[in-house]
Amino acid sequence: MATPLRLVFNPTGDLLAASRRCEADIFLRWYGNTSQQLAEEYDRYEASSVFVALADERDDVLGIVRFVVPGVAGLKTLNDVGLPPWNAVPVRSAAAARIDPATTWDCATMGLRPDRSRSAARLSLALYHGLLLALRVNQVHTVVAVLDERARRLLSSIGLVLHPIPGTTAAPYLGSAASTPVYAHLAAGLDQQRRLAPEAHRLVTLGIGLDGISVPAPDAFRLTPAGAPARAPARQVVSTPVGHFG
């Protein structure tokens, strides 16, 4: 029997277009950002943007992650800490947190369609697994983001702790009442999750217990120098009885 939901790394064609529509719907609903505002924020990063899509059997995209990977434009989060409302010095802030932009990915956007509230917990866990799998497969050392404080608390609840980038604090940002530029060094962060939240580590990081989600083999999450990941047959995530960003 076909699995109704699947994770896709670096979608192309119609699925990429659907991912962008999903992103626009999410940010209009939750933060009031119009498509024009999103374009103004992200146009300079389009060449270095890579999506993770959570799609159903009709190729409707229910949730997305947009990564900005190292490129000519830099990382949006590090660029933004130098602007209002923070006005920090990005190079100093990065150095103080031991952030090397060359080995860092920016989780620039992430979310679920607003009409999926009934299954938000399950879908969020699947999306977080796709996010972490992409980071791990590509041997990313550090992840940065500007996170709404509600999303940051949800991540903390499953053992994924992100720290404020030095020189920043929670402040209004692009329609969010309180967002914080944050970072996490991946190896240390996942080791802490494994020790402090072992069930969440198994479910979200390792993908053990995600019901009804088709996840490609890890190589399908690898970003090649040309920007196209290697493709591999999907694997079915098998249900395992574990405890519970959803």
Image (spheres, rainbow, N blue to C red):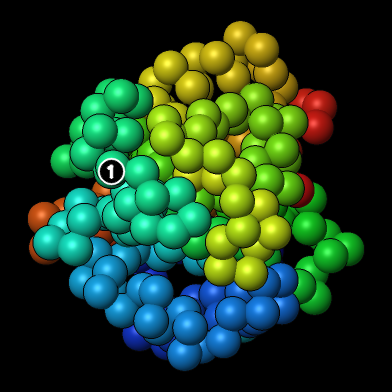
**Displayed quadrant of residue 237:** top right
The kind of residue on which mark 1 rests is: Pro
Q: Position of residue 100 (x, y in %)?
A: 21, 33
In the image, residue 167 sits, relative to residue 20, either above or below, namely above
* Residue closer to the observer: 19 or 156: 156
Secondary structure found at label 1: helix
Tell whether 77 sits left or right of 190: left
Local crowd size for mark 1, using a 10 Å CA cut-off: few (<14), some (14–19), many (≥20): some
Quadrant of the rendered structure where residue 159 is?
top right
Q: Nearer the viewer, residue 63 or 107?
A: 107
Q: Residue at x 65, y 41 (%)?
A: 152
> Which residue is drawn at the image coordinates 55% and 45% (left, top)?
180
Q: Height in image: 182 above or below 113?
A: above
Relative placement, left or right, of 107 versus 142 is right
Query: Does residue 114 appear to the left or right of 190 in the view shown?
Result: right
Q: Is residue 14 visible?
A: yes
Residue at (57, 87) in percent of width and height: 34
Frontmost residue, 195 versus 235: 195
Residue that label 1 marks: 90
Residue 214 in the image, given as x and y percentages of width and height:
57, 55
